Image (cartoon, helix red, strand yellow):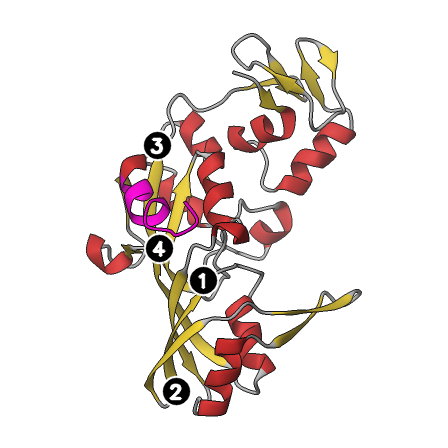
Amino acid sequence: MKIRLHQFLSKTGAFSSKSDVKRAIWGGEIMVNGSLVKDIAYEFNPEKRVVTFRGDVLELPLNERYFLLNKPAGVICSRLNKHESALGKRSVFERFNDHLDSRTFRSLVTVGRLDEGTTGLLIVTTDGNIVHTITNPNSRIGKSYRVQTTMKISEEQATSIRNGVTVETSDGIVSDSYISRPAELVLEGEKVALITIYEGKKREIRRIFEAVGNNVVDLHRLSIGNMELSGYGLEEGDFCEVELEEISNKILNNNDSF
């Protein structure tokens, strides 16, 4: 079975991000059967070709693995780079380091990302196809969270969030804006709400509340589709392994888009 080069590299676990994959390819660091390849869309059969990065052979994991993690606060959903390590940052992948063989460990990726301060349900896997399917906004898979805010959530704020709000973004250099997709929101208390979103832009829920004049102080993901964290008895920081069939039944097969 053929696979595109960038997909293969992402699944090996040798790279911390898609941008690292692209840099390696375009920088002339990837060899396929001894030949330099700079085309990220290059297709090949990994069972018949040997891929090397800086002289090291890269391989796909033997079997796809799927894990549910109750993510604690204070860890990030990516491999640590030198700068992050120097700052004392911690990664969710550290939770798996002593429990998996090195090949599987290197191949782990998260299904979307929760920011450093957000807790709750996170799927970690070696299966890039599942990552794409669940995170694709066109799949319309709901992700539900419990939100606690600094101020009372007014009915006006709740209605705006349900309808979609204009979100402003900036990385310090480039500014942009977008209108959030309509969300489901139920008030549990004056400063607590349950919210379900159907896309997953960076820090989206925090930015949505900022857009209506409020701020999030605690954010916890409860579920993805019909897969609820509460059903697995995981303490904060713990994980368990599940089968693809369970993910399909609770997330994919129960979604109207499938």
Q: Callout 3: helix, strand or loop?
A: loop
Of circles 1 and 4, which is in front? Answer: 4
- Residue 85 shows in the view: yes
> Of the residues under marks 2 and 3, which one precedes in the sequence?
3
Q: Quadrant of the C terminus?
A: top left
Residues under labels 1 and 3: Cα distance? Answer: 23 Å
Q: Residue at x 33, y 41 (%)?
A: 248
Q: Residue at x 29, y 48 (%)?
A: 250
Residues under labels 2 and 4: Cα distance? Answer: 25 Å
> Seen in the image, is 192 located left or right of residue 170?
left
Q: Nearer the viewer, residue 19 or 168?
A: 168
Amino acid residing under circle 3:
Leu
| 242, above or below 53, in the image | below
Q: How many marks?
A: 4
Of circles 2 and 4, which is in front? Answer: 4
Would you say residue 257 sits in the magenta stretch? Answer: yes
Circle 3 residue: 100
Circle 4 residue: 225
> Of the residues under marks 3 and 4, which one precedes in the sequence?
3
- Residue 111 shows in the view: no
Amino acid residing under circle 4:
Gly
Residues under labels 1 and 2: Cα distance? Answer: 23 Å
Amino acid residing under circle 1:
Gly
- Disc number placed over residue 74 in the picture, else none: 1
Q: Callout 4: helix, strand or loop?
A: loop
